[in-house]
């Protein structure tokens, strides 16, 4: 039974269980974007996290009729200004961000940008587009610099897939 619904999600109740469905998450995507030995991350302001500034990979819902790979490319371009050929987005697997509360299963892709790639215009969703040496990622994670679940999960998939060492 639908307990609540808006354009972005609905709360479902089945017996004593409640969960959130995000219809547009079905073809949503998250992207590990590399340029040389550097990982592209977004600095995001998250009101739901007490206004925290977080480092995250690009991600988002898919648009109507869009594949997850197409969503990955669009999100990368919208959020970072970087673009790459659609065929260069390598599937890494899926993330279920909160199995107790969300029905979402989101595809994760990796893309390697050209060494001389320069960003074009981007939307204002991210406060900044940053890049980080892959050699420094473990220390950054240990120091609490990356706490976003999508980003941490995607980094694990990238390591398992040989994209990151």
Image: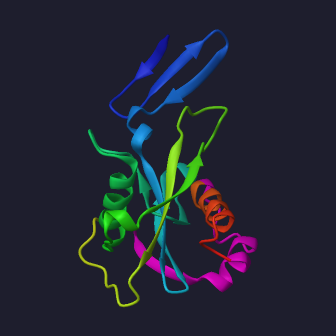
Is 148 one of the magenta-colored residues? yes
Q: How many marks?
A: 0
Relative to 116, say whether 109 is above or below.
above
Which residues make up the magenta segment?
A: 126-149
* Residue in the image at 58% along x and 61% along y: 151
* Residue in the image at 70% along x and 69% along y: 144
Relative to 50, say whether 66 is above or below.
above
- Can you give x and y, in whole percent of width and height, for residue 50 in the image? 56, 54
* Residue in the image at 67% along x and 68% along y: 159
Q: Say if residue 55 shows up in the picture.
A: yes
- Can you give x and y, in whole percent of width and height, for residue 21 in the image? 48, 29
- Residue pushed farthest right? 142
- Between 83 and 130, the one nearer to me in the picture: 83
- Residue pushed farthest left? 121
Relative to 95, say whether 103 is above or below.
above
Q: Give the color scheme: rainbow, by chain, secondary structure or one colour.
A: rainbow
* Relative to 157, 53 lies left or right: left
- Residue pushed farthest front? 87
**Position of the C terminus by quadrant:** bottom right
- Can you give x and y, in whole percent of width and height, for residue 81 in the image? 30, 73
* Relative to 5, 122 lies left or right: left
- Can you give x and y, in whole percent of width and height, for residue 67 in the image? 34, 46
Is 158 one of the magenta-colored residues? no
Q: Say if residue 124 shows up in the picture.
A: no
């Amino acid at each position: 039974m639908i307990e609540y619904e808006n354009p972005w999600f609905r709360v479902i109740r089945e017996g004593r269980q409640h969960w959130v469905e995000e219809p547009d998450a079905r073809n949503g995507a998250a992207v590990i974007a590399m340029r040389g030995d550097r990982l592209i991350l977004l600095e995001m302001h998250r009101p739901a996290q007490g206004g925290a500034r977080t480092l995250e990979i690009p991600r988002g819902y898919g648009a109507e009729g869009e594949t997850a790979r197409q969503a990955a490319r669009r999100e990368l371009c919208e959020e970072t200004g970087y673009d790459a050929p659609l065929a260069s987005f390598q599937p890494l697997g899926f993330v279920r961000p909160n199995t107790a509360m969300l029905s979402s299963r989101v595809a994760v892709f990796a893309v390697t940008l050209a060494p001389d790639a320069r960003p074009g215009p981007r939307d204002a969703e991210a406060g900044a587009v940053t890049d980080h040496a892959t050699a420094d990622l473990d220390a950054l994670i240990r120091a609490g610099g990356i706490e976003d679940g999508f980003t941490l999960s995607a980094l694990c998939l990238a390591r398992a897939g040989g994209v990151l060492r």
